[in-house]
């Protein structure tokens, strides 16, 4: 197996896109000179230089050299730091027409893709052992998703709904026309916009073709910013499939038994405390390794707090869910996972009572971007004369879904002298490192 080509969705379903070719490309066998160009959706087709097409591919003779720039790429989609920027990418460029607009796809080699992911997901000045560990899990995750796309072949359930319950999870269902998207929904990928360092290139090159496997299958190697002290179990976040290497586990070096955070009393105590863990750190030097400038706009992540007034919360939930609950009487956790993350949450309102899940649906419903995690406890404030709380305080733990590698925890492990093999075995117990190409 050679270094495979992958298709990365950069911008999805826009009516107009502007871009620059920085080298000579080929379109249907004819050379296209460097310069500024534009495509737009016209009657369901792509209009380019007066010609209407269903798709356009600017082919590169040298994927490692040729590059292009896309204008106004949205990064951090629906997150608190969402913004637009111009981004440069190596390799080929493909536009396809979809119902909602034009989608731009970067055709690149997997190893070049990884050099960007490692620099985009965290600081390119991170420690060598952390970079090697992340290169292996990012490569593993992508190859596992490509195989998963082939296996599910469009037959993939991602929700359960009834008159009183909505349970959704968000994973591979969004991407059928390319392998992976460029945003945090998959892996953050910003091309060569943020220049990779020699250290990142070396970490990718030195681990070239290496993946983690379990039972001869490439691991679905998940990761998040901060687990909050205990890792979450895969099936509590996504589809009900058990991966033995993605189970609840304390983010520390000890062997003490895990507290049972599926029990509300234990979860309440855990989340309100600050137990020791690799990811329990405010060390600025460590955080700079993992968090880019816009990520550091989030000051608290191991433990955090959000306060909503009644008016704010009720209007927010209506806006985000499309369901009018009336005034909110209570947010009641019904089921928690191994890390204390809520899997099913009952929203009790004056007009409606519904249960929602899984964790990302909860985070999307309770925030204008994404709540840091679904590991939280709720304190209701003073009630009005009708017995309705006028304020809700959410006290929470962790940043992200908490499954697999905890990036801040892994950075601390590397700082403490752990090698990348030890970091991988800590976060993916029972896995082994294999070379696939």
Image: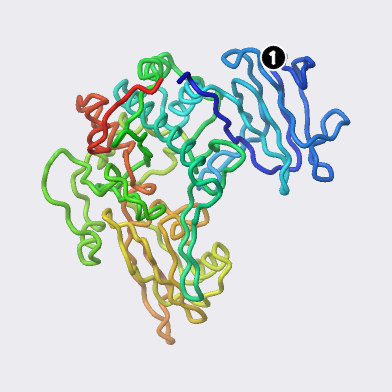
Eyeballing the image, is 269 above or below 369?
below
- Using the image as rendered, state which of residue 400 and residue 219 is in the foreground: 219
Q: How many marks?
A: 1
Eyeballing the image, is 376 above or below 311?
above
Q: How is the image coloured?
A: rainbow
Taking the image as shown, residue 300 lies to the left or right of residue 315, namely: left
| Residue in the image at 32% along x and 33% along y | 216
Q: Where's the C terminus, which quadrant?
A: top left
Of helix, strand and loop, which one carries label 1? Answer: loop
In which image quadrant can residue 425 be found? top left
Report which residue position mark 1 lands on.
23
In which image quadrant can residue 201 be found? top left
Q: Position of residue 302 (x, y in %)?
A: 30, 47
Farthest residue, direction right: 50
Few, some or many residues within 10 Å of mark 1 (<14, 14–19, 20+): some
- Using the image as rendered, state which of residue 35 and residue 173 is in the foreground: 173
Q: Position of residue 324 (x, y in %)?
A: 56, 74
Eyeballing the image, is 84 above or below 241?
above
| Residue in the image at 44% along x and 66% along y | 356
Taking the image as shown, residue 365 lies to the left or right of residue 73, namely: left
Q: Position of residue 248 (x, y in %)?
A: 25, 49
Q: Position of residue 352 (x, y in %)?
A: 50, 78
- Using the image as rendered, state which of residue 305 and residue 157 is in the foreground: 157
Q: Where's the N terminus, which quadrant?
A: top left
């Amino acid at each position: 197996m050679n270094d495979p080509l992958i298709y990365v969705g950069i911008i999805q379903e826009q009516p107009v896109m502007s871009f620059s070719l920085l080298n000579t490309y080929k379109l249907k066998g004819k050379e296209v000179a460097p310069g500024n160009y534009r495509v737009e959706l016209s009657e369901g087709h792509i209009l380019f230089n007066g010609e209407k097409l269903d798709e356009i591919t600017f082919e590169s003779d040298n994927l490692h050299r040729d590059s292009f720039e896309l204008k106004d790429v949205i990064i951090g989609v629906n997150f608190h730091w969402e913004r637009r920027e111009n981004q440069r990418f190596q390799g080929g460029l493909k536009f396809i027409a979809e119902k909602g607009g034009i989608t731009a796809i970067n055709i690149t080699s997997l190893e070049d893709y990884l050099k960007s992911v490692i620099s985009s997901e965290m600081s390119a000045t991170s420690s060598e052992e952390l970079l090697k560990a992340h290169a292996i899990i990012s490569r593993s995750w992508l190859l596992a998703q490509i195989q998963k796309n082939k296996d599910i072949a469009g037959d993939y359930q991602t929700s359960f709904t009834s008159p009183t319950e909505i349970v959704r999870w968000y994973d591979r269902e969004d991407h059928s026309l390319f392998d992976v998207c460029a945003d945090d929904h998959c892996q953050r990928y910003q091309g060569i916009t943020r220049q990779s360092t020699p250290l990142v290139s070396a970490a990718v090159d030195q681990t070239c073709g290496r993946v983690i496997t379990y039972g001869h299958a490439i691991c679905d190697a998940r990761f998040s910013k901060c687990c909050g002290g205990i890792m979450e179990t895969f099936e509590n976040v996504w589809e009900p499939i058990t991966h033995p290497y993605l189970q609840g586990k304390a983010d520390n070096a000890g062997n003490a038994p895990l507290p049972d955070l599926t029990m509300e009393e234990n979860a309440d105590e855990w989340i309100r405390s600050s137990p020791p863990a690799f990811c329990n750190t405010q060390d600025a030097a460590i955080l700079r390794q993992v968090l880019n400038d816009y990520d550091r706009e989030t000051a608290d992540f191991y433990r955090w707090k959000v306060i909503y007034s009644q008016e704010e919360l009720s209007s927010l939930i209506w806006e985000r869910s499309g369901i009018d609950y009336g005034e909110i009487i209570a947010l009641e956790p019904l089921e928690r996972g191994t890390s204390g993350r809520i899997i099913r949450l009952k929203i009790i309102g004056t007009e409606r009572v519904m249960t929602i899940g899984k964790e990302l649906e909860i985070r999307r419903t309770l925030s204008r971007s994404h709540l840091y995690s679904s590991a939280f406890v709720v304190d209701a404030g003073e009630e009005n004369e009708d017995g309705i709380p006028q304020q809700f305080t959410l006290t929470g733990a962790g940043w992200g879904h908490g499954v697999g590698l905890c990036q801040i925890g892994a950075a601390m492990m590397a700082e403490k002298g752990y090698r990348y093999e030890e970091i991988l075995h800590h976060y993916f117990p029972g896995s082994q490192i294999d070379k696939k190409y």
